[in-house]
Amino acid sequence: MEYFVNCNTAPLSPYTAPLDRSRVQHLFRRAGFSASVQTVDQAVGQSADALVDSLIGAAQNLLPQPAPAWATWNRDNYPEDDDLARQTIRAQQETWALEYTRGLLNNNLRDRLSFFWSNHFVTELDFYDSPAFLYEYTNCLQRNALGNFKTFVSEIGLTNAMLFYLDGAYNNGDNPNENYARELYELFTLGEGNGYTEADVVETSRALSGYTERGEVRWTPVTFDPTTFDSGTKTILGQTGNWGYDDVIDILFQQRAAEISRFICQKLYEFFVHPDSDDDEGNAQTIISGMANTFQANNFEIAPVLAELFKSQHFFDEDAIGVIIKSPFDLFLNFINESGFPYTDTTLSFAMESSRLLGQNLFDPFDVAGWQRDRTWINTNFIIGRWLTSEVLIQGFFQENPEQFRTLAMEAVGPAESNTSNPETVVRALVDKFLPKGLLTPQDFENAMSVFKIEDVPENYYGSDYIPGGLGIWMLTVSMEVPQQVFLLLMHLARQPEFQLK
């Protein structure tokens, strides 16, 4: 697969032209897990300003997923038998994973961001293994996904998932554990070695001590025990005092505002625009500087930064479209949304399990640094797996209802062409719908046409706008072969390099 150099030189100033179909699809692929034909059709022609405001407003007004009945369960709520308790735990976690994945499909920006932040403020479910802690963690992600980053940092550090995962629950004042203090700086706010010292890590771990009142992992929420808090004087980022947890957050955001802003905005840029922010050919660093200024000026509110980015010429530039490799979740959820095919819990379970096999296990990144994304999703084993699992997904939809493939094609070409007798019209519409940059060469498009067309038919089978003298025996709306043709085309496209991009 060709890797894209970041040559984008467009500015952060607003994109003012009405959005065409390609740019609407681009926005939905980046700000959510894509969208249906109908959603895209409704957005075509809108301004970036109006559409982005609508997406952000919907995300800010969306309530977190409702708490399940077991949200506050402890050991007393589970069967006494350990095996039965384990079965109950597994069923609850699987149910919550389904609900969360359904949210990713339906909620666009809010849950796209909650998924992004789960790979920033990383925990691993296998480590703490508690349905109640998982709910608390995902609830924190959803509530803060588009809110204030300082508040987010403060709240996420006290979730039970994080306290157990990075050993905050074992951070005693007389024997401080440095794990969370180190990751707070290195991974969550500043970046490795940027604006802090080893002494800051040690002193910060002392200030974060005391959240040690706990029972067993999985069962009992952690609470603060003042007898295990280090009440001595600490010096953190040049500030000296008897600091505690809240003081650490205040000092960090007061003393390192510029560093935090740039680090977080670079991560947002690389996730939403282009994975390479250091290419000399473009001006990514200038864009990131502008975003960081906005972040700092708005007291670390996330929404103004994303609004500026998503409305910008830089975001909608041709060099920003189709240059990020889909994650496994993108691969499957994008197709479900773009096809508009009805799905079931079985479909979502298949998508989650396939994603796990392809290196993206929901709620379980492989380490505290999270999934490294983009090029790491593509290797010899993964690309074959991506082909095969995509084909299984498409085959399942076809076996369920072949006729919905005709409907998809008719929606893709639009009402004016829905009764076309020109196969090229259909192929081009489906290529443009599922591949953000289309196919690379004219020969690639001819290959797609060959897959779609029926062999051993009369010369005039297709209409005269495709074959001179054609009678138009084939018609999109009525010909019995159409569902099979669309199915075979999608199976072919799923193996093209361009299908892997968003």
Image (tube, rainbow, N blue to C red):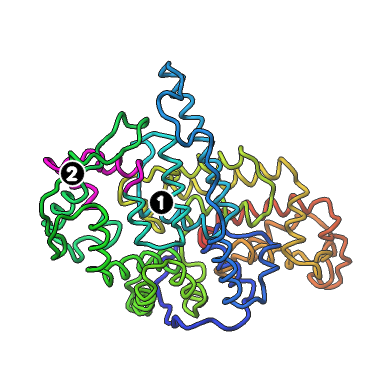
Task: Work out how far the residue at label 2 is from the one at label 1, CA to CA, in angstroms.
Answer: 29 Å
What amino acid is at disc 1? Ser
- Residue that appears at 71% across and 40% down: 399
Q: Return the residue nearer the eye: 10 or 210.
A: 210
Q: Return the residue nearer the eye: 470 or 288.
A: 288
In percent of width and height, residue 246 lies at: 27, 55
The answer to whether 43 is drawn above or below residue 338 in the figure is below
**Residue 66 falls in image quadrant:** top right
Pointer 2: residues within 10 angstroms few (<14), some, or many (20+)? many
Q: Is residue 86 left or right of residue 228?
A: right
Mark 2 vs mark 1: give the one in front.
2
- Residue that appears at 75% across and 44% down: 401
The answer to whether 280 is drawn above or below residue 197 in the figure is below
Secondary structure of residue under mark 2: loop
Q: Of the numbered discs in the image, which one, if any, rests on residue 451?
A: none
Q: Of the numbered discs in the image, which one, if any, rests on residue 118?
A: 1
Q: Is residue 1 left or right of residue 232?
A: right
The answer to whether 137 is drawn above or below residue 61 in the figure is above
Please state the extent of the stretch shown in magenta in the rendering: 158-183
What amino acid is at disc 2? Phe
Q: Say whether marks 2 and 1 touch (CB < 8 Å).
A: no
Task: Quarter of the image for the N terminus: give it.
Answer: bottom left
Secondary structure of residue under mark 1: helix
In percent of width and height, residue 101 lies at: 54, 46
Q: Of the numbered discs in the image, which one, if any, rests on residue 229?
A: 2
